[in-house]
Amino acid sequence: MIRHLVRALLLAAVAAMVASCAIQSGTVVLLPDKDGKDTALTVTQRGTKVTLAEPYAGTKLTNEGPKAYRSSQEEVQAEFGDALAARPVGPVQFTLYFVEGKDELTDESKQVVNTVFVEIAKRPVPDVLVIGHTDAVGTDQLNDKLSRDRADFIRAGLIQSGIAPENIVAIGRGKRELFVPTADGVAHPRNRRVEIVVR
Amino acid sequence: MTNAATILRCLAMIAAALLLCSPAGAAEIGQIKISKGQVTVERKGAALPATVGMRLESADVLRTGADGSVGITMADNSLLSAGPNSILSLDRFEFDPTTSQGQFDAQLRKGSLAVISGRIAKQSPEAMTVRTPSAILGVRGTEFVLSAND
């Protein structure tokens, strides 16, 4: 009988502690943008919405809702070091320009090709997307083929330099996505390009 | 046979039929770039060992062990990396690479996660969300960390 009473009292005490303490169930910290751009995050918990808008603005998630606090680089490193260390190398984008009407790079762009190889080589499993474009001279049919030829030309070069073919996708967008908007039929060197996204 | 068992069997058959009807070749949404220690990917009820280079699909769940961590790149250029003892589920990922429109909902069920948001959040603020068991984060961009306890 007494044992039952003690157990009931203990359970009640535990329940009261659980209810009264702000049990932490997580942490959220906004970090500085590496390019220095504005950055923000909203956190909604238990019907309360807070906005984190400053680097190292943080919130503890508790059973009473979000509790704002100020974190620091040291604290983030201590708590999130393993997660941060597993971060992949970020995506990089290149644009190479072509001689009018051809799948031949401009002299200037030929110099950039090596940088692209170096970026790809940094990654254990590179994922490369090559997107060919043309300027607004000619028919859609002609430009679709030319844009695809340009992308294929770059893809072939990357394969030749040792990148596995299954990691490179080449597509052509024709004259649909002009970098510099022009009227149809206008030649523009900035539109004759291939964009390479390395992930 | 009990009624409950019959109902369960019927439900299992319906689930199997639905799986068979789903479109073939689920779209790739991302790729594992870094994997250390014990990491598994749960996909359609199976637990697959995570390998570097593995392609990810919507609804995949990544689990890291006590010595594990994993880093992934999504198709919209978002980067997510989880520390040890974490469960990260990629609940929903829709992305139009031409317009950058889309929706990305991930969930950190427990553990720790570092995020750099990508084109989806840039195009439409808060079109990327990260849930924990108690909170929901609307991502305007770009870099943040979060943890979730059991």
Image (cartoon, rainbow, N blue to C red):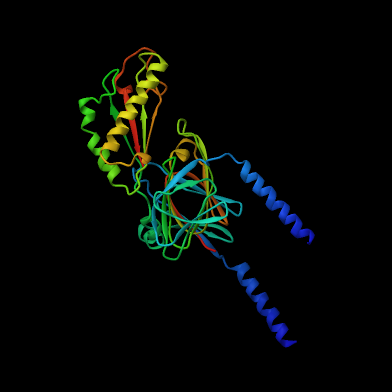
Residue beneath the point at 34% across and 31% down: A195
Please determine whether, in this image, residue B47 is positioned above or below residue A135.
below
**Residue A25 in which image quadrant:** bottom right
- Please name whichever residue, A126 or A83, is drawn nearer the observer in this view of the structure: A126
The vertical placement of B65 against A138, above or below, is below
Residue B17 drawn at (x, y percent): 66, 45
The quadrant the N terminus of chain B occupies is bottom right
Q: Could you say which is closer to the camera, residue B99 or residue B136?
A: B99
Residue B100 appears in the figure: yes
Q: Is residue A133 visible?
A: no
Position of residue B30 measured from the top left corner of the image (x, y, whole percent): 45, 45
Residue occupying image coordinates x 28% and y 18%:
A100
Q: Nearer the viewer, residue A54 or B60?
A: B60
Percent coordinates x, y for residue B120 in the rendering: 47, 39
Give the residue drawn at x 35%, y 39%.
A165
Q: Position of residue A38 (x, y in %)?
A: 40, 42
Residue sitting at x 50%, y 40%: B27
Identify whether A123 is placed above or below B63: above
Seen in the picture, residue A168 relative to A58 is either above or below; the reply is above
User: Furthest-top residue in view?
Assistant: A185
The mark tally for this picture is: 0
Which image quadrant: the C terminus of chain B? bottom right
> Which residue in the rendered view is the most extreme toward the bottom?
A2
